Amino acid sequence: MAKPQLTQVLKMLLRNAKRLDQRLTAQERFWLMRSGFVQRQPEGGFILPTVTLLLLMLSLVLGLLIFRTGTRTNQVIGERQQRQVYNAATPAVERAKTKLEYLFTEEPIPILPSEQDLETALAKDDYQLQDEQRIDINNDGVLDNAWTFRFDSDGKPGDDTVVAYSILTRSIAYAPTDPANPNNPVVAAEIQDDDPTKADKLVVRSSPINTTGVGQRPDCPDLGRSLYVGWEQVGGSQLRKSIQVHAVAKSLNAGNSTIATLEMQQDKQANLGNKWGAWFRYDLEIFPGPSFNWNGAMYTAGNYIIGDSTDRVKFYPISAPSSCVYTESSSEMAIGEFKQDVNGGTPWQGQYVTGSMKANDDRGDSRIFLFGQTANPQKIDKANDSVVANTKPADVALNPVLVLTEDINQTRANSAADNVKSAAATRDAAWNGRAWVTSKRLYGKDEATPYVDDTFRADNRWGPKPVYAKRRPRLVLKRVCRFLTLAKTKFRGPMRNY
């Protein structure tokens, strides 16, 4: 009885299954088959591999951080040691700069000293400080202009760094003179040779820094030559000489092999008297009838007073841009700004005033071509000259009696020598922003009296000497400095003992 009932139930199930199959859509069949036949992955073994991978990644990150920390620590220690040694080399450069400053300002050397004059002066005991020792750096048996001293770089008791530095002034070195031919010395090294050759003969490594570019052009090969041995011609009216300071510092601490090297170059510049087309101790006045065109450099220790006409006064550079003597220095128009040797250094400030003294008015104008400009010159009139509005030429003009008798700059309208604070000669605040000032075409500066003879003097009053009963005028020696760091250092001679 049970068997027929079971058979009937099975038939009913099959019938319902067939009916269900007919009613199912394709999407419902796919879902049903996927749910029934796709086997689920066991989840029991998933945690261990994940934890292992995370631990491995964490270990790598921690290891990298520890390695980076250790490397950075060593790097900081090395940089600190290098900085300590480098700081020890810096005082050597400062010592050398002080010696050079004394050499060119206090030492009784010629106006244009030769290399032998400089070396002889530096060889004096006056240039050896108390804690220094003069050394021989090229093993020729002669003590050179080089010194060594010890230095405390870390603040702890005792000196931990040895420093050596030298001052080189030679641009050419000669071999020992042949007694049989003393008038024909043999050149042993010059500035064009390689560095090892120059180092053995104590010749500077490089020529003066030529900021003008003149003398380097292929069409001006002779302009860089000079009649003064050791000085190089820059343009037509300037001489420059290269002086180099080399400093080496080495740590004396065990385990610290840090070596610092430093090179400083100073270029001494001398202006020859033929730079200036016009050099006036008194006010420079221009109020022409016909057109007045000027080429070249001009200086007044007083004031420029130019005007009384329109578009008649034009100031041009020294020559055409393609000329070998076309330089900014040879084209500048300078106005005296300096401290006088009276009343503890009273300042003087020259002015550029539009107008004329004969009528004491501010009429007229002047035109100035900027360096590199060949057209459209700048116009200067009462609206943009160096003084405030309503300033007349007589307000700023020099007192000629004081100039000739006492060599003092003082305006006629002011009894005080300090014209900078004078209300009658106040400088226009916008003057320093003018194009001719920012480009160094027309600007104020302190310029030493050049050495000229009667040929250059317009008044022919005092002869060749520009000043009497005053300190000896000195040629201006300017400094242009640059710092270089050498990549390698080679110790020679006595340095091996440290």
Image (cartoon, rainbow, N blue to C red):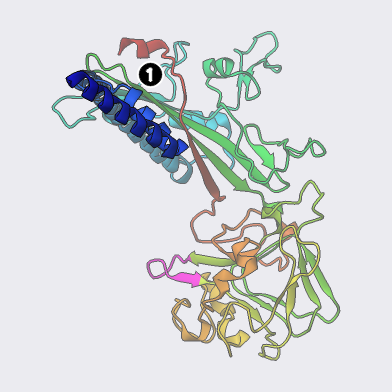
- Crowd rating for badge 1 (residues with CA inside 10 Å; few <14, some 14–19, many 20+): many
Q: Quadrant of the C terminus?
A: top left
Q: Which residue is mark 1?
A: 135
Q: Nearer the viewer, residue 420 or 51?
A: 51
267 left or right of 93?
right
Q: Is residue 93 magenta?
A: no
| Vertical relation: 325 (above or below) 317 | above
Tell me how many marks there are. 1
**Magenta residues?**
339-348
Corner quadrant of residue 446 = bottom right
Foreground residue, 125 or 68? 68
* Residue 291 in view (yes/no): yes
Instruction: Give amino acid for label 1.
Output: Ile
Residue 305: x and y in percent read 66, 78
- State left or right for residue 47 relative to residue 323: left
Picture coordinates of residue 246, whole percent (x, y): 44, 27
Q: Residue furthest right?
A: 290
Q: Residue at x 68, y 81 (%)?
A: 381
Would residue 67 be visible to someone looking at this image? no
Residue shown at 59% from the left, 29% from the top:
206
Q: Secondary structure at mark 1?
A: loop
Residue at the outermost front position: 1
Identity of the residue drawn at 46% across and 65% down: 339
At x 76%, y 51%, the residue is 326
Give the prevailing secondary structure in the magenta stretch: loop
Occupied quadrant, residue 147:
top left
Quarter of the image with the N terminus in it: top left
Q: Residue 81: x, y in percent?
A: 27, 26
Q: Nearer the viewer, residue 78 or 31?
A: 31
Where 441 falls versus 63 (above or below)?
A: below
